Amino acid sequence: MQGRTSGPRGTRVALTLGFSAVLLGVIAWKVEPLKLVAVLRGTHPALVLLAALSAGAGLTMVAIRWHLMLRFRRIADRLSDSVRTALIGYGLTMVLPGAVFADVAKSYYHSRRHQRPVDELLLVCGLDRFAGMIGLGGYGLVIAVVCVPVAVPDASGIRWKGLPGVGWILGLGLIVAAAVLAARHPRVRRSLDRGRALVRDGWNGLRTRPGLLLISALLSVVGNLFVAGTLAFGLASVAPEALPWGKILWTLPVIGLAAAFPFTVAGAGAREGAAIALWSACGIPAPVAVAACLVTLTANLFWAALGGLLLAISPPPVRNG
């Protein structure tokens, strides 16, 4: 069993790492490496620390939501165990091509480590994702109400100055991802069917707990605000002058969504391309945009590395009998 699963998994990880490396390399070359290095030399360490803390706070919201869903299904362990699993799951998300793969891997880890039924843990992942999607919708509404009215008056002056070729690279990435999914169509369809069944069954129970659903959605909203804050602190840490925050705020969640693109490591490459395209309209030079994204990537990878370390030093699972 181990031999049959390690090969495809290793291939997916290698493809993910390679795709992100190519994207980052092309974008860095387009913005001129010397200019990028000059911007990074002026980075403010205190703001980098705040970016890392903001990323950690967002991950904490995810861990608490996961713990609440475990308690709802009556399989919760200590909060520290839930946080540990959430960190490991976050680390897996960085290298596995998509959140679904990471959720499955996280569920199997928690099942083996704490002797919990894996089917229940997969259900918890479905509930957790469902609450997260509701929270994401609420987060989008908050951004639309608060940020968009500030930016709309200046919309007529927007002039897109994205780097030539970046759009083609991102488009090619989408085509490659679609081709990979198409090649695995039967498996994807079965996974979607299982996911729909899990969410449906979970929702039939969760709808009787509107308070839990509301709290979980609010945790998602706050978590997404911290994610946007990570990017904002990253930009502030490398910006050589005052920033037009009124124009920029609405772009933070859009860039965050671009960073969720699968087949990348922590959104590396996709985040930079989106930041260049959006922030160029706000007068932010491409080297500054890429430097801000690299600071954000570093903040995220710090927590991912911590999750990987926890996975590496985890003791072997307890075997009954």
Image (spheres, grey):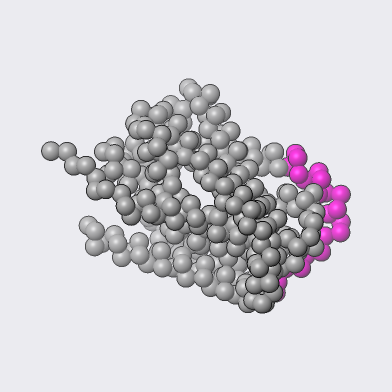
Q: Residue at x 64, y 40 (%)?
A: 139
Q: Residue furthest left?
A: 321
> Where does the image place residue 203, in percent across and percent down from the top left?
46, 31
Classify 190 as above or below 134.
below
> Where does the image place residue 186, in percent across and percent down from the top left?
38, 56
Is residue 267 visible in this depiction of the protein? no
Number of labels in the image equals 0
**115 vs 244, nearest the viewer:** 244
Q: Residue at x 32, y 39 (%)?
A: 119
Check the picture and name the quadrant holding the C terminus. top left
Q: Residue at x 55, y 63 (%)?
A: 268
Residue 18 located left or right of residue 219 = left
Classify 199 as above or below 92.
above
> Where does the image place residue 197, in percent across and percent down from the top left?
40, 38
> Where does the image place residue 286, in percent across and percent down from the top left?
71, 68
When asked about the image quadrant of residue 13, the answer is bottom left
**101 vs 290, nearest the viewer:** 290
Check the picture and name the quadrant holding the N terminus. bottom left
Residue 204 located left or right of residue 39 = left
Is residue 119 visible in this depiction of the protein? yes
The magenta-colored residue range is 144-165
Residue 213 on the magenta segment: no
Q: Residue at x 58, y 33 (%)?
A: 218
**91 vs 137, nearest the viewer:** 91
